[in-house]
Amino acid sequence: QVQLVESGGGVVQPGTSLRLSCAASGFTFSTYGMHWVRQAPGKGLEWVAVISYDGNRKFYTDSVKGRFTTSRDNSKNTLYLEMNSLRPEDTAVYYCAKDPGFWSGYSDNWGQGTLVTVSS
Amino acid sequence: EIVLTQSPGTLSLSPGERATLSCRASQNVNRSFLAWYQQRRGQAPKLLIYGASSRATGIPDRFSGSGSGTDFTLTISRLEPEDFAVYYCQQYGNSPWTFGQGTKVEIK
């Protein structure tokens, strides 16, 4: 079955960087688009970024453009989110989620999430 | 950006009752590209419905979705104890893809 396991979260100071990873298994990782979605404590869901199956196309929500970069290593079945210039408002649980196709826009499987806390 | 407004914010019902959740978009959602997710406390979201009305794999038929354009509905025909959760709609017809703020279905 599909399994997505995020890691790399933690407590960091504003202005610093963090890299999240998402290890995928149970499906052919290299043939599906992947998403990052975040959820601030006690709040709703916010879509953050998407990457195509081959890593050649990426798209971000405006609030993270220029600060966050998503990438993937299909040889390692792993998705990444590099987060720079972190702000307190980036504090959230970050989920990686599988797209059901190339770039459908919704997610049919989700990881359990990793918590990122940005605080001084 | 399309803004999705879900109503009501909280729905208080008893097991066995019918739940009707609304999701209204600020503009037309292209090709009814609307999904519904369930999030139980402390868990990741789970896909219920995509394409406004197609059930995801393994989702019981008590869950149904309908609607088009700007008005969409998720109906749970008879609430089971495990259905008490928060439900989110998401549009993926126009970028950036956006979520509604959620409807909490709680036990009355």
Image (tube, helix red, strand yellow):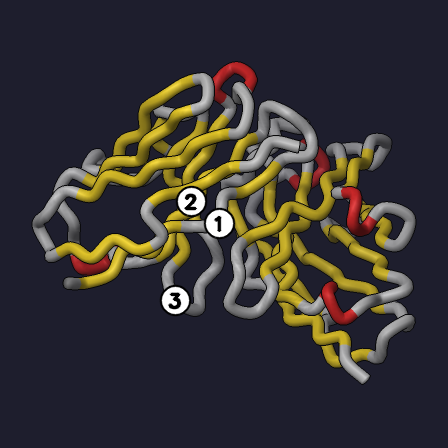
- Under mark 3, the amino acid is Arg
- Under mark 1, the amino acid is Gln
Q: Which residue is mark 2?
A: B37
Left or right: residue A44 versus residue B71 is: right
Q: Nearer the viewer, residue B53 or A72?
A: B53
Distance from Cα at disc 1 to Cα at disc 2: 12 Å
Q: Can you give x and y, in whole percent of width and height, for residue A98 in the image?
A: 60, 42
Which is more N-terminal, label 3 or label 1? 3
Left or right: residue B50 versus residue B26 is: left
Which is more N-terminal, label 2 or label 1? 2
Q: Which residue is mark 3?
A: B41
To which chain does the residue with label 2 belong? Answer: B
Local packing at callout 1 (Cα closer than 10 Å; few below 14, some 14-19, many 20+) is many
The extreme left residue here reads B16
Residue A51, relative to residue A112: is it above or below? above
Residue B64, relative to residue A67: is it above or below? above
